[in-house]
Amino acid sequence: MEDSKHQDVEIEEAQVESSCSEAQLLPKDETVLELLDSINNYLLLMDSLSSKLRDGWFELAGARQSMGSSRVSSALFDLKYHHAATLMEVDHGDADSNLKQPHFTLHKWLSTDNQEFSPEGGKFEEDELLQRKSSSPHSTEEHQEKRSENGPEVLSSPSSPYTPNSNIKKERAKSLSMFGTLVSPKLRDAQLSFETVLETLQEVANVRSSMLAAYEQVLKEIEISKI
Amino acid sequence: MANRAQIPTNNSALIAMIADEDTITGFLLAGVGNVDLRRKTNYLIVDGKTTVKQIEDAFKEFTAREDIAIVLVSQYVANMIRFLVDSYNKPIPAILEIPSKDHPYDPAHDSVLSRVKYLFSSESVASERR
């Protein structure tokens, strides 16, 4: 009797040991849960994005119906040189950490006259140099006259005389002016809907970034457990 | 070039788009459109006449530019260049597949989700056990 009990205890101990060794081979639960959470968040955000895009398309269709399809078409897109008013700031994350997880922040309706945020890579710098080279002395004089009319605060000073709200209204109106001076309220609604879509896209980009980071971490732990 | 003074930037960059006309119209209304001095835009409108080569060239161009943070691609367009999208693995610019009016979002085709779900597929579990 005592021998059989002793054998049972030994068998149980062996089973516990084997389950512990199996657990050591698997990546940590915390990392896997983080990955699954980010996948879940990504899917929920994509569902929300789809819904907001549908609202935007619906309002655009309504604007096209009230204004006419020729007044809301790609033929009217502004192909003259201009900066984007809405940009995405990228924070490349901690340089010391092994996991590079970029973080995205949306900046809406920046002043295109006096752009404080310049895109990376010096591309705008290149455009400015090209602009200076192509400008003639005649146009330079005109430019100087305009500066004296408007005052230095508009062109040279980094701080705009406009309040943030009036600047946002001005940039929104500039965007709408592509389709004419008088636009349907539905086109304004479409503009607001797509602004909301951009906010959701910012969240999607961040969740995607954390999902990829969690995925890399899980893969790393699997590799370590194989050694 | 090397001696040119750098304009202090704060890492803000453009959002590029490869999508249908309505989607691009909406995003341009939201202020995302950019045209440089060479008349190059940060978007490509995909319609019935757009070739796969044009889409591929636009994708390669946008993903190579340093001034672009995100590339929005309609999922049905991404399916036309699926090999290119799936083989892209840089963190910036981020490629986001979005639905279009006529083609709803399908998680099964999403490049990032397909990469991640392999971890949980029966094939990967079976190969680990061997």
Image (cartoon, grey):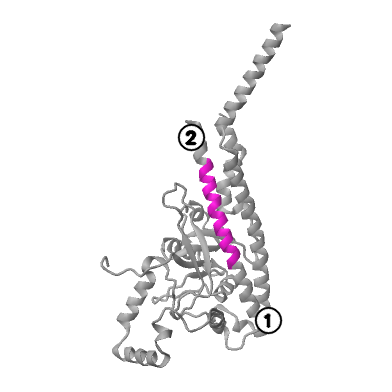
Looking at the image, can residue A152 be seen? yes
- Work out which residue is located at the far left of the displayed protein and give it: B3
Q: Position of residue A141 (x, y in %)?
A: 32, 91
State the image quarter where residue A168 is shown.
bottom right
Q: CA distance from mark 2 to mark 1?
A: 60 Å
Asked if A145 appears above or below B54 in the picture, the reply is below
State the image quarter where residue A123 is shown.
bottom left
Residue shown at the point (41%, 61%) measured from the top left: B64
Q: Position of residue A112 (x, y in %)?
A: 47, 78
Residue type, mark 1 in image: Gln
Mark 2 and mark 1 on one chain: yes
* Secondary structure mainly formed by the magenta segment: helix
Query: Magenta stretch?
Result: A198-218
Looking at the image, can residue B74 be seen? no
Question: What residue does disc 2 label?
Answer: A224
- Residue neighbourhood size for the residue with mark 2, other residues' Cα within 10 Å, grouped as few (<14), some (14–19), many (≥20): few
**Is A169 positioned to the left or the right of A185 in the image?**
left
Q: Nearer the viewer, residue A170 or B122?
A: A170
Residue shown at the point (60%, 51%) measured from the top left: A38
